[in-house]
């Protein structure tokens, strides 16, 4: 017999506990504005540990304590959260408020406390500062004012943690309007040589369309093994990350995650759930199945891939993709004549239309295959000596061989598997000196890379024990001069659990002044800096990609200088190693100040009262390799 009274009592206690915790906190912006980013979203090297609240691109909105507690920690830096307050609450909870413009000073005296600590340490940016005496605050009490310090434009970053190291999803404690999951673009990418997706030997790009209540895409021809990368988001003020995604192949679950909580030691798992090689914070791609799990393999029949996206309110969105097995256009030296669409033979420098039975031994020819609306890239062969496309090698390159010409596969440098677009040719010609087949492409094999090394610790990324290094041609920003060759270190989709070390040899006769290691980052370059170790320059990184040892020869640029009654404003930017914020100085009428600096926008600002009349202002700035600039102004405050 069930003890219904006991069960009712337990249920009551559970509900009481849930609602008491859920009602414990309030939003730090009142009235509530809107979500612009969600918990557990993709960030370059980690998960997003909280939510971002819109400040409507404004600064100076009052930020209030979400619950009564005590301020025990403050962060002040030009990176990360910029200015942040940490409050400890009952029950072991901690709330975090990031990217503030100012700390509250009138009642709490936080600005005065920071200035006193800075003078004692001899630096403006204190980093993490634990208070010797905690400061008690009431629920709803103002603790600071919103801003844009650190990463991103004006907004408020808000977190709820269990202790200091375990972020929790704030939407489990606080209600916020958030829409259903939307499915957008997707990519099928081959996982081994000889596989085809959408009649292509590398990648197939598609986009889901909503038909009725379900997102759909017409059936796609596939052969072999591949991974599925999906763009998905929840509707908020912009795009928010998805709380939970489940994927099923013919009813069997192959992927599942929930954005409920994590510890900071688990940040590396972002590189398993997201494909960081093609993701951005605005358009992340979920990896299905996650890296480290076997890929999807289809070698016969028809199959269904179903994806469920669930938001924090339990609303479900569904996407459906039909997959049909079709034999590839070329395999093991044989052409699939059933799919043949076009045949051309090379005569001199030109290609002529022909039939298969008219091709003579030794002639170079190319074929194009089709299945429905899906058309393969050109497949280049030589009669009698076609090379098996399954042959692979470790080194990677970005060139393919078409006849006797070299053409870049894509404008982006390639990682495994190679990128492809409409210009792609699948090359199956005989082996040449210095060339072998990789994923159906003829690539340059460079075994002479001895002036760069990369060390990876065991267990850093599934299946990756050693990085591959090849030389490449890349362009640097103005004022940055390469000292070493450019190196591409792959696989680029790897987010390492532990720091790897890149070592680039300093060329003989080169003076390592104003130099550092630069890493290709999206459309730009990130300055890693590093140190000299004998004949090498070394730097630590968790991300792979393009690397070069380069010299920065240009100082920062200063522009848009303004002087007014309430302070000084300027924009200071550097396209090379970057502005070094602690080295910025505003010298006003002979008195030196160190301003706050917003790294994303390049804004340097100082809030002080300035009397009317003429003033002499000197602005000094320095980058991370010690290029200096100094500009003087005579300005009038009216």
Image: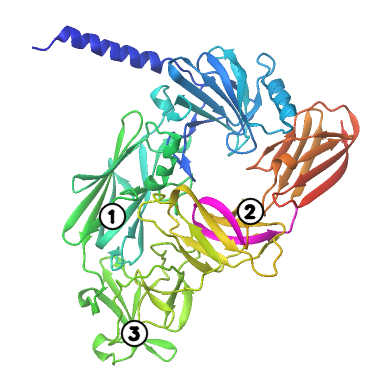
- The stretch drawn in magenta includes residue 194: no
**Residue at left offset 73%, top offset 27%:** 120
Q: CA distance from mark 3 to mark 1?
A: 33 Å
Q: CA distance from mark 2 to mark 1?
A: 40 Å
Q: Are marks 3 and 2 in contact (CB under 8 Å)?
A: no
Where does label 3 land, which residue?
365
Circle nearer the viewer, 3 or 1: 1
**Extent of the magenta region:** 536-555
Where does label 1 land, which residue?
295
For the C terminus, the quadrant is top right
- In primary-sequence order, the first of circles 3 and 2 is 3
- Residue ranking furthest to the top: 5
Where does label 2 land, which residue?
531
Task: From this view, report whether residue 159 is shown above or below residue 625.
Answer: above
- Where residue 593 appears, as percent x and y from the top left, is 80, 33
- Where residue 548 appears, as percent x and y from the top left, is 59, 61
Q: CA distance from mark 3 to mark 2?
A: 52 Å
């Amino acid at each position: 017999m069930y003890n219904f009274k006991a069960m009712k009592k337990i249920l009551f206690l559970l509900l009481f506990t849930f609602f008491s915790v859920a009602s414990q906190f309030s939003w730090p912006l009142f009235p509530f504005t809107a979500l612009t980013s969600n918990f557990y979203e993709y960030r370059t090297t980690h998960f997003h540990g909280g939510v971002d609240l819109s400040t409507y691109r404004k600064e100076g909105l009052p930020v209030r304590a979400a619950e009564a507690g005590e301020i025990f920690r403050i962060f002040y830096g030009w990176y990360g959260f910029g200015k942040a307050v940490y409050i400890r609450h009952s029950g072991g909870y901690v709330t975090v408020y990031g990217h503030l413009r100012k700390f509250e000073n009138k009642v709490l005296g936080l600005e005065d406390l920071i200035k006193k600590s800075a003078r004692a340490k001899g630096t403006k940016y204190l980093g993490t500062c634990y208070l010797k005496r905690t400061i008690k605050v009431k629920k709803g009490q103002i603790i600071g004012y919103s801003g844009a310090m650190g990463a991103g434009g004006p907004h408020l970053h808000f977190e709820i943690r269990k202790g200091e190291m375990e972020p929790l999803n704030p939407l489990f404690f606080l209600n916020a309007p958030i829409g259903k999951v939307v499915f957008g673009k997707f990519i099928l990418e081959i996982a081994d040589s000889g596989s085809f997706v959408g009649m292509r030997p590398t990648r197939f790009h598609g986009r889901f369309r909503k038909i009725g209540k379900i997102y759909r895409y017409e059936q796609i021809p596939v052969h072999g093994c591949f991974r599925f990368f999906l763009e998905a988001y929840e509707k908020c003020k912009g795009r928010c990350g998805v709380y939970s995604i489940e994927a099923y192949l013919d009813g069997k679950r192959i992927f599942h995650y929930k954005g409920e909580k994590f510890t900071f030691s688990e940040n590396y798992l972002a590189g398993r759930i997201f494909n960081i090689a093609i993701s951005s914070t605005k358009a992340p791609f979920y990896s299905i199945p996650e890296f480290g799990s076997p890929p999807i393999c289809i070698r016969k029949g028809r199959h269904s891939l179903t994806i469920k996206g669930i938001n924090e309110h339990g609303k479900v969105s569904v996407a459906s993709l039909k997959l049909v097995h079709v034999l590839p256009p070329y395999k093991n030296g044989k052409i699939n004549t059933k799919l043949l669409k076009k045949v051309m033979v090379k005569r001199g420098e030109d290609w002529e239309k022909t039939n298969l039975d008219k091709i003579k031994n030794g002639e170079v020819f190319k074929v194009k295959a089709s299945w429905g609306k899906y058309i393969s890239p050109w497949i280049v062969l030589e009669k009698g000596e076609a090379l098996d496309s399954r042959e692979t090698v470790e080194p990677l390159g970005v060139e393919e061989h078409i006849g006797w010409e070299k053409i870049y596969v894509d404008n982006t440098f390639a990682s495994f598997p190679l990128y492809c677009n409409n210009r792609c040719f699948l090359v199956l010609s005989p082996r040449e000196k210095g060339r072998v087949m990789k994923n159906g492409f003829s690539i340059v094999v460079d075994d002479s890379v001895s002036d760069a090394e990369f060390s990876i610790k065991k267990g850093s990324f599934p299946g990756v024990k050693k990085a591959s290094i090849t030389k490449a041609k890349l362009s640097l920003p103005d004022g940055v001069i390469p000292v070493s060759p450019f190196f591409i270190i792959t696989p680029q989709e790897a987010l390492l659990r532990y720091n790897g070390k890149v070592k680039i040899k300093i060329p003989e006769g080169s003076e390592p002044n104003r130099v550092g290691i630069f890493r290709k980052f999206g459309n730009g370059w990130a300055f890693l800096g590093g140190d000299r170790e004998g004949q090498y320059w070394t730097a630590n990184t968790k991300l792979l990609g393009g690397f070069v040892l380069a010299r920065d020869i240009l100082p920062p640029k200063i522009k848009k200088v303004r002087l007014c009654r309430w302070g000084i404003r300027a924009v200071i930017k550097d396209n090379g190693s970057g502005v070094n914020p602690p080295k910025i100085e505003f010298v006003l009428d002979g008195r030196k100040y160190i301003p706050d600096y917003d790294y994303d926008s390049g804004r340097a600002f100082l809030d002080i009262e300035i009397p009317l009349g003429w003033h002499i202002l000197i602005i000094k700035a320095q980058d991370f390799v010690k290029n200096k600039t100094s500009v003087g102004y005579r300005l009038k405050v009216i």
